Image (cartoon, rainbow, N blue to C red):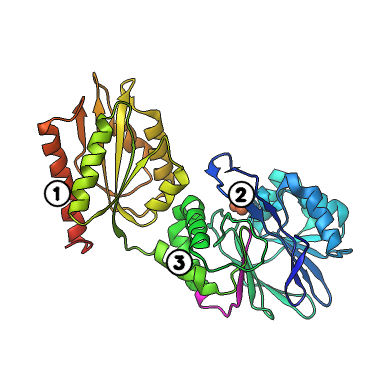
Amino acid sequence: MAPKEIINNIFYTGLNHRERRLFDELIPLPMGTTYNSYLIKASEKTVLVDTMYPPKSDEFIERLEKAGLEKLDYIVCNHGEQDHTGAIPKVLKRYPEAKILTNEKCKNLLIDMLHIAEDKFQIVADGEEISLGDKTLKFIYAPWVHWPDTMFTYVKEDKIIFTCDFLGSHSPFENLFAPETPELLKAAKRYYAEIMMPFRNFCKKYVQLLKGMDIDMIATSHGPIYKNPSFILDAYETWTADEVKNEVVIPYVSMYESTKEMVDYMAEKLSDKGIEVKPFDVVEEDLGELAMELVEACTVVFGSSMVLAGPHPAAVTTAYLAGALRPKVKFVSFIGSYGWGGVLVEKLEQALSGIRAEKLEPVIIKGKPKEVDFAKLDVLIESIYEKHKGLGLVK
Ligand code: FEO
């Protein structure tokens, strides 16, 4: 895609990366991603907002040249992570006169990660404005979405705000503006679940901040530009709210069907009680889908077979990831089956320490479930039902 004008001499200079399948060597990217960058050609100064993922640096420089960029005054760094800053050394080589506008925290990160000389930086304060002639940049510190250095940059005259990772989505695009489709919403929810959910309270705060501003467009650093800010802000308002849905998520791993039998039993009985159940095979399925399920669920029940006297490693990894994502679930429990013995619950609980939820009595059984085991599951099912009822989620 050639550099395209978004509005009044503000151009999109980012790139799609459709082939990328993993982010941070961890997060699945079913569609790939984009690294967004924006060029502002104001009457007196020219500014680049965020740059590029290092392997695409050369393509990025070509792109800037194609956009007719001969002289660059500033590079705004809204966030130090290298998918947006890795190309800075090459950009500075091509445009040596440019200064980096950022905050102190981001500056220190960039010095450590990219060895950029200290005299290349100009620190901007929270709320500070810089005139570019016919346009004015305003910087808004917004730490912890998702690093301590994050900030937003607002162009006052055009009412466009650059929010870097916040509100983004891993969705490549050809047309600049976000289609208001369920597919995009799903991509944005996946992105929220995987990257922003641990910082839910900060997200909540910044959604309100943005809702209170005069904004016509939100331009993030991944995914298309939102021409209708409320499309994404309203969705974030729901995802970050304290309220939960009448849902039980059951991530499980089952070696010889015994744990699976317990999962199926719980799923059927909970459904009969009017509760939505999402069983999730953690070996077979995409963990990004699980992260999405955790965004609004009320309860999570981990299911695991016992292997080598402990929970299956796939269950431990999943519990660790779920704990790190810190979903707003209210209740948590564990089910599983062992052959000859071991410790299951304590190890999963340890892995899950990031979740602050009430623990409901686990059900750990020997071998294939028997009558007495189903009776124990009935107690757990009833307990979940009562808890959901107590929150007014089910009649
Ligand atoms: Fe898209 Fe935190 O980097």
Q: What is the three-letter code of the residue carrying label 1?
A: Glu
Magenta region: 211-221
Q: Which mark is residue 32?
A: 2
Above-or-below relation of 5 to 110: below
Residue at left offset 16%, top offset 63%: 395
- Asked if residue 87 is among those painted magenta in the image, a careful observer would answer no
Question: Are the two marked residues, 2 and 1, in contact with CB atoms closer than 8 angstroms?
Answer: no
Callout 1: helix, strand or loop? helix
* Label located before the other in sequence (2 or 3): 2
Crowdedness near tag 1: few (<14), some (14–19) or many (≥20) residues, C-alpha within 10 Å: some
Callout 2: helix, strand or loop? loop
Percent coordinates x, y for residue 204 in the rendering: 45, 65
- Near-viewer residue (358 or 293): 293
CA distance separating discs 2 and 1: 42 Å
Question: Are the two marked residues, 2 and 3, in contact with CB atoms closer than 8 angstroms?
Answer: no
- Near-viewer residue (218 or 118): 218
- Residue denoted by label 3: 235
Above-or-below relation of 26 to 136: above
Q: What is the three-letter code of the residue carrying label 3?
A: Ala
CA distance separating discs 3 and 1: 32 Å
Callout 3: helix, strand or loop? helix
- Residue denoted by label 1: 382
